[in-house]
Amino acid sequence: MGSIRLNKINKSFGATEVLKNINLEISDGEFLILVGPSGCGKSTLMNLIAGLEDITSGEIVIDGKDISSESPKDRDIAMVFQSYALYPTMDVARNICFGLEMRKTPKKEQEAILKEVSEVLQIDQLLDRKPGQLSGGQRQRVAMGRALARSPKVFLFDEPLSNLDAKLRVEMRTEIKKLHQRLKTTIVYVTHDQVEAMTLADRIAVLKDGEVQQLGTPYEIYNDPVSHFVADFMGSPGMNFIECVVKDKKLIIESSGQRYELTVPCEKELVDSKLDTVLLGIRPEMLTEVTPEASSPYIQEISFDVLVIEPMGADTVAIGEWNNTEVIARLNPDSGKHAGKEFKLQVDTSKAVLFNPNSGLRLR
Amino acid sequence: MNRQTPLSINIGRVMIYLLLVAFALLYLAPLYVMIATSFKDIEEIRSGNLMAPPLSPTFYAWTKAWSSACTGSECEGLAPFFWNSVKIVVPAVSISTIIGAFNGYALAKWRFKGSEFLFGALLFGCFIPFQVILLPMAKLLGSLGLANTVTGLVMVHVIYGVAFTTLFFRNYYVGVPTELVRAARLDGAGFLNTFRYIFLPLSTPIFVVTVIWQFTQIWNDFLFGVVYSGAGTQPITVALNNLVNTSVGGKEYNVDMAAAIIAALPTLVVYVVAGKYFVRGLTAGAVKG
């Protein structure tokens, strides 16, 4: 069991407010990801849950019990640190068992747990090595082993993959997900990598300046962002934002002598907002090659100047200029397009989102 | 690229080496004179050249300096004072090093209200000259009933040394990642267990540095030794001074030299045995986890 409730959490360091009125419910077995740019308070929030720092006000409830003032060791929480924080003078086995040793678990039981954990993580060959003799990926596994050994109510992961190289990071990401599916223990995971957030999370909390901007499933966060900030932060390559003039429920774009009238799904909100200009948000995958058979009021053909083509293997990214804004389109890699002027593309606005250019908030 | 054939002789380089050798010899000359003189008999010293090697080496001066030279009215050599020094140095070094380790650990990793101020105040202790505290300390020792005792001297050295040992350990432990402390806290280790299982095993280099430093300071101390010791508790430095200044008959330079070497030997031995750690410990960076 391990449900967490964060109730009106505030945290200040001196006069600096780091976290402002955080309210989060994390249900038992959930994989929650805290994501945001550096300095948004996500690591602080994690330290508060772990008890490594004291909250200024509010309460942290685990399984119905207020643990706000309990010491870290009594919270039944295990944490995987960004630097792994393995004890450098102890071998792998002792690193994993140290928490059990401190809790006076009988030796026999410790050995059984060590065996099980090291087999799950495939580190049973490394038990008598010192952390200094391990590679980055192996250290990462040992750090996870140390957390697993205590079978706590909650796991905290503080940017655990950020010190690994790109390939290993993807591998470990999958392993963490597998591990979670197997153990079904609550996980709170901090990252600034939006790909990690999208791939791992049951729900994502996007933080900015110490406040939760949006809490939702990866699908909601990606497709239904509440603000320009969230939309911009999630997705790679990022969402395109184009400033448009509003006229008769349509968005007007003028680019290289051409005039386009775009129909968007949220006409009512657009009219209600009474704005003259709005920020149109379109994901790159909605800007593609022209498919003549497609027909919908939202689809239309446009042309713009492509400056750079970036083949990524599975797809090709074209970066161009439209309406004096840098715009990214996602193309089929087999079309073999080259950079050039007057590139024909089709834009699909059926999933477009609109933001108030002043407040950055979504029109809804 | 400035290529050189291996056989070509570079005049500049030869000059540099010659100069370095010359300075090294100059620097070593006093040591040579001390050792050579200590093995000569008094006749040879009077008649011979200062730099000449001993023609018929003898241990006379060494034996006398150790066991029968006069230090004031007593004529028992340096031996009893050597052991006095050992009795002062061993507890003073151990106690001040252990306290320093705890202080340094607490100040580096367990910040509390006023910990910065406390560290600043301790640091200040490093800069207080010996002379300034002579009188107040004498009064304190007197009122504690520790005047002229080994215990009193140990206490003075511990108090004086804690400032330095704390500084050493604190600066060393600051380089240990704080995440280790956090991980240990989550694992259920408290203040003492974290120190014992995580910090202590990392501390060999800094222990060696601190022990060498404290040993040298306390063994070589003269001022506290001469002021706070009684007739039976004088350390070897004070005895050496008395030995050199006591002249029964003519001045025995060979005995003086042997005595000076005896007094200096322990610190030399400590440095030779553990010296490589000294440099390593002083320059040791962060401990990689």
Image (spheres, coloured by chain):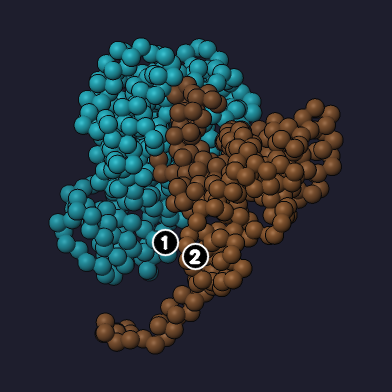
In depth, the one of A166 and A313 nearer the eye is A166
- Locate residue A56: give its quadrant: top right
Residue picked out by circle 2: B54
Residue A325's disc is: 1
Q: Which chain carries label 2?
A: B
Q: In this view, does B7 lie above or below A23?
A: below
Numbered disc 1: secondary structure? strand
Mark 2, Cα crowd under 10 Å, few <14 / some 14-19 / many 20+, is some
Q: Colour of chain B?
A: brown
User: Helix, strand or loop at disc 2?
Assistant: loop
Q: Which amino acid type is shown beneath numbered disc 1?
A: Thr
Query: How many marks are shown on the rendered structure?
Result: 2
Q: Residue A252 versus residue B289: which sits nearer the camera?
A: B289
Residue drawn where x is 42% and y is 64% of the image: A324
Q: Which chain is cyan?
A: A
The residue sitting at 60% across, 27% down in the picture is A55
